[in-house]
Amino acid sequence: MIIDGKQIAQQLKEELRGQVAVLTGKYGRKPCLDVIIVGQNPASMSYVKSKIKATEYCGFDGELIQLPEATSQEELLRVIAERNGKDDVDGILVQLPLPKHIDEQTVIEAIAPGKDVDGFHPSNVAGLWLNQPAIVPCTPLGIIALLEQTHVDLGGRHAVIVGRSNIVGKPIAKLLLDKNCTVTIAHSRTKDLAAICRKADILIVAVGRPRMITADMVKQGAIVIDVGINRLEDGRLVGDVDFETVAPIAGAITPVPGGVGPMTITMLMRNTIECYKKRINK
Ligand code: GUN
């Protein structure tokens, strides 16, 4: 079974669009997401364009703020502070990675926690881990939504996550713990990765290494979620999983493109609407 993230994301986006129309009528203002990009990293430019397109589809207001590569950290912090102070801005997203002369953590911490639609601010990270109200990162939310689509009971299942990033690996581990999975986090220093991956009922891969997960690393019937988006020299996009050889073994698998990526964007729309609702109700 191939998990059609594109279609599931589209359905959810249609629902959100309906909600936005109702909310806009009721409160007289659209949700608003501002997206900031520094420099012209081609992958980042492409992601940001998809995010803006989704905001337009859902009926949001918002601005794409394109800053030159040479923008100073001070200037970026000034732009963020200005958006923090605007009452009609609900969400602020700074596309990562940032140029080397800018400290990412400082930038993340400058975003008002209530507008941090990525869920990267320490207040939101703490909230997630302490089971308190928090904005949860979009990719992990999208993965959970895809797993729910398979109607597999997650309780007691062994989930192996390959990758320990703050954006995906760590937060998805917490969400899967909350679903009563037994969770293993593997990473670049893990010994005998293949043996650990073969134990997985649910295998989630977020490392950014093209087709590193091969058929010999996957248990028959496992659910495989591929978070990687890698561009090969010939221009093709492939995941971290070798789809051709793994798909016949997997019980269910996400393709790249058209798997996790579209769900991440849809969850960004959902997080923005949640921020909007909280601000309206204040
Ligand atoms: N770069 C790669 N993934 C993400 C994401 O989810 N949010 C932001 N802001 N930057 C990213």
Image (tube, rainbow, N blue to C red):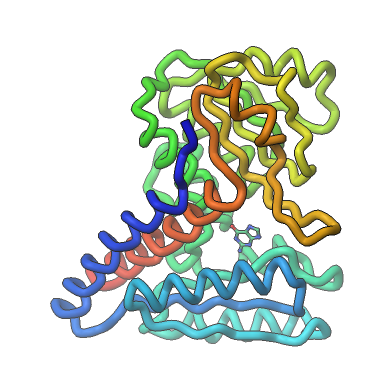
Name the residue nearer the viewer: 95 or 150: 150
Quadrant containing the C terminus is bottom left
Left or right placement of residue 58 versus residue 39 in this view: left
Observer-nearest residue: 182 or 127?
A: 182
From this view, report whether residue 243 is shown above or below residue 112.
Answer: above
Q: Residue at x 60, y 20 (%)?
A: 249
Task: From the viewer's perspective, tell me whether residue 54 is left or right of residue 161.
Answer: left
Residue 241 location (% of width, % of height): 69, 36
Q: Residue at x 64, y 13 (%)?
A: 199
Is residue 247 depicted above or below 80 in this figure? above
Q: Quadrant of residue 274?
A: bottom left
Q: Residue at x 57, y 75 (%)?
A: 49
Question: Who is closer to the viewer here, 183 or 204?
Answer: 204
Which percent across, then down, holds residue 56?
40, 78
Q: Which residue occupies the extreme left position in the image?
A: 26
Up/down of 19 relative to 72, above or below: above
Of the four image quadrants, the one with ligand 1 is: bottom right
Asked if 184 appears above or below 156 in the picture, the reply is below
Residue 169: percent from the left, percent from the top?
63, 38
Question: Where's residue 92, x and y in %?
Answer: 51, 73
Residue at the location (27% across, 66% down)? 277
Relative side of 257 to 1, left or right: right
